[in-house]
Amino acid sequence: MASSPCGNSNFDSGLEIKTRSVEQTLIPLVSQITTLINHKEKPKKSERTLAAIHRVGQAVSVAVGRFVAVGEAIAAENQELKDEMGQACFEARRAGDAIAQLTDVGSALPSQSDGRVTVFSDRTGMVKAARLLLSSVTKVLVLADRIVIKQIITSRNKVLVTLDHLERVSTFQEFVQIFSQFGNEMVEFAHLTGDRQNDLKDEKKKARMAAARAVLEKCTMMLLTASKTCLRHPDCESARINKDAVFHRMRCALEQVIEIVTEARSCGENKILPASIYNGIKDFKSSVECLRENLYSLSPEILGSQLEALVERTEDFTDSAYTSHEQRQAILNLCQLVRQDTQQLMHAWIEAQSLHAKEATEDMEVAILKTCQSVSDLRHELHKVAVGRASDLLKVHGEQLPLRALKAAGAEGNLEVVAEYSRTLTEQKEQLVETCRLLCHVSGTEPLEITCIHAEETFHVIGPQIISAAQTLALHPSSKIAKENLEVFCEAWESQLCDMALLLREINDVFEGRRGDKRPYLSLPRPGKHSANLKTAKAVKLDAEEQTSIAKLGLELRLLSSDVDTELEKWEEQEHDIVRQSQSLASMAYNMYLFTRGEGLLKTTLDLFHQAEVCAFVSSKLSFPSPSILFFSTVLLECILCYIRPETYWEMEKLVAFCQQLQTGTKTPVQGKTATFQKVDSSIQTTRGILTVVLSLLPFCNKLNKKFKSERSSLGSPHDWRDRQDASTPVKEEGALNGKNSNGFGVKSLEQHMATFNLLESK
């Protein structure tokens, strides 16, 4: 812990807390100890206060007892930690007992004057006990955390052994048997590392872990098809090169995960990241603004060297063959402007120092503002260039023309055409690699820089792998496994393009001051009345091949959920019911995406089906017309009916159909692994369909809401209108969906709807 509850640094346990789970476990204990120590200095306490302190003390003692019992059980199962854990548990129990005794009413002394009881006669003893308790409990937690690290290392070792066996197999039968074992081990490793990634406090480590796990996720399917191709065509050099590259990349990723969890010195996180322009601008502006407070905080020479280092980094933009002449000239002009403004600042700075000024003069303040503005303009221009190029490349590569041509040429056995389009793909790869490097310069945070570097490395590696896979197919055009192998590598390329699109959006969010954090709507549904049919279902974990097959669907969910979030940002009323429920859908879809990666709160297929059922429930409430569309007047209704296009009606009908399909699917019991996998696949596909429809309807709903507000302002208050409407036209509860009632939408009140929704959410 960084500090004690009472501000005494002696409470420091000397152990750095690296995970959120350990930190969150300590928070309640710290809170209770703070209550005990930070009591008022009055020696006399009322009976009520005394009873409260006594309860807190006893609660601490009981909690420590339970905690120690778990720690001792862990020690019994892990002999190498038995002595350390035993000692820490002993100290924790002793400290808990001491706190219980110090807060015991029976041991307190009655006052002769008014009969009240005096407690904490030994305040020093309480502080000492609290210090010992925090230190020992923290040590127990950190030791327990070492068990988690040991589990990850053990899992990695099993994967490596099986990987070695896979690389040496010589028959299909042996390969199939070992790959099945490998798949199970990879699933276990994915869940362990996914939990660890989510638990890490350091965002840079989380980003590195995510990058390594993404490599393992993509490479698992590549390893399957590349190995099968090599077994089918053992004398094919391009097939062998393809397979060796996959095995090498998987081993590197496995090693990177272990370096992160063990904090080995060779860990890439300890390596210096490439100097980014964003960080250079940030440091330069910080140095300039510090001059306001202290004219002597640095020398003009240091500021000048910072500026030149910053300008030098812009050469990655200006020297690029893909930067237009106009963009290059704009960057050079802004660099020159920053130099001029900095030179004026230095003149004003030196003059202020010669006058022995204690703070920035007026001339100097103006120069500081101009310098900061010009360097901000430079950052804006560089961001525009990098993001603009990335957007253009994604549009061009979205058509996948070289990949299609390579597949066709390979299937025809045309090596010349394969060579021609291999050069085209290589050029595209170089463009993407350079663009990722530019995005790294403007990403805005170190975790995003790490993600950019990962994207750059991925394009750099997968490009040649696609070419070698296409060469193999061209040499063996009738080989189904060679064709499948090329498909898998092309899908990995497409998947990385999807990841790059998301990365681009996150970089824009940071630049515009948004971090894109998802609101926690129904992140993990709890079994309740709505999912009673699933209570007795058996949870199933998918193997590696099955998880890989739904990974593409998961990526589509992730993109759609981000698109929904972006569309919702255009709404003026962020608390509107449509916005809240659509955000809920996007959040649930994002959780399903994490499930396909072995991450997040959905650990098993049972969790996924629970989530899908709630997703269907929320989606059904967005079916038009619904309470979410508000109450419309008879006059406005005619406008709305004319406003809706036929395709919008079709989308509404699709949404209803998808909701019914998802509800039916989640309630259908399945037995066996194959049936479970099919149900998972169907649930994710249907959820994707729901999000697609919702995304298409949101702009219409937004326009409709604005139109309603405009009409409402001219018709009077909603309350007045509703009174007139109720008095003149009865509204039926049913039939509106089928057009049986032309006088109203025939829906329950918004309040009833939200009451039902909140009841479900509370369960």
Image (spheres, helix red, strand yellow):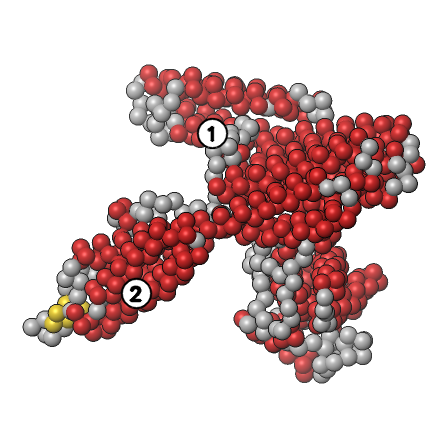
Quarter that holds the C terminus: bottom right
Question: In terms of secondary structure, where does tag 2 sit?
Answer: helix
Residue 24 placed where, x, y %?
42, 56
Q: Nearer the viewer, residue 422 or 439?
A: 422
Q: Nearer the viewer, residue 75 or 470?
A: 75
Question: In terms of secondary structure, where does tag 1 sit?
Answer: helix
Location of mark 2 (residue): 61
* Residue drawn at (38%, 53%) of the image: 82
Rounded to the nearest angstrom, the CA distance separating label 2 from label 1 is 49 Å
Residue 510 placed where, x, y %?
57, 42
* Residue drawn at (48%, 41%) of the image: 262
Q: Nearer the viewer, residue 416 or 453?
A: 416
Vertical comparison of 646 with 498: above or below: below
Which numbered circle lies on residue 175? none
- Using a 10 Å C-alpha cutoff, classify the residue at mark 1 as few (fewer than 14 neighbours), some (14 to 19) or many (20 or more): some
Q: Quadrant of residue 623?
A: bottom right
566 vs 198, left or right, is right
68 vs 567, left or right, is left
Location of mark 1 (residue): 283
Vertical comparison of 713 with 279: above or below: below
* Residue drawn at (35%, 30%) of the image: 293
Vertical comparison of 597 with 492: above or below: below
- Using a 10 Å C-alpha cutoff, classify the residue at mark 2 as few (fewer than 14 neighbours), some (14 to 19) or many (20 or more): many
Question: Which numbered disc flags the more N-terminal residue, 2 or 1?
Answer: 2
609 vs 12, left or right, is right
Q: Which residue occupies the extreme left position in the image?
A: 112
Does residue 537 appear in this view? Answer: yes
Residue 699 placed where, x, y %?
72, 56
Give, as a three-letter code, the residue at label 1: Asp
Give, as a three-letter code, the residue at label 2: Ser
Residue 60 placed where, x, y %?
31, 64
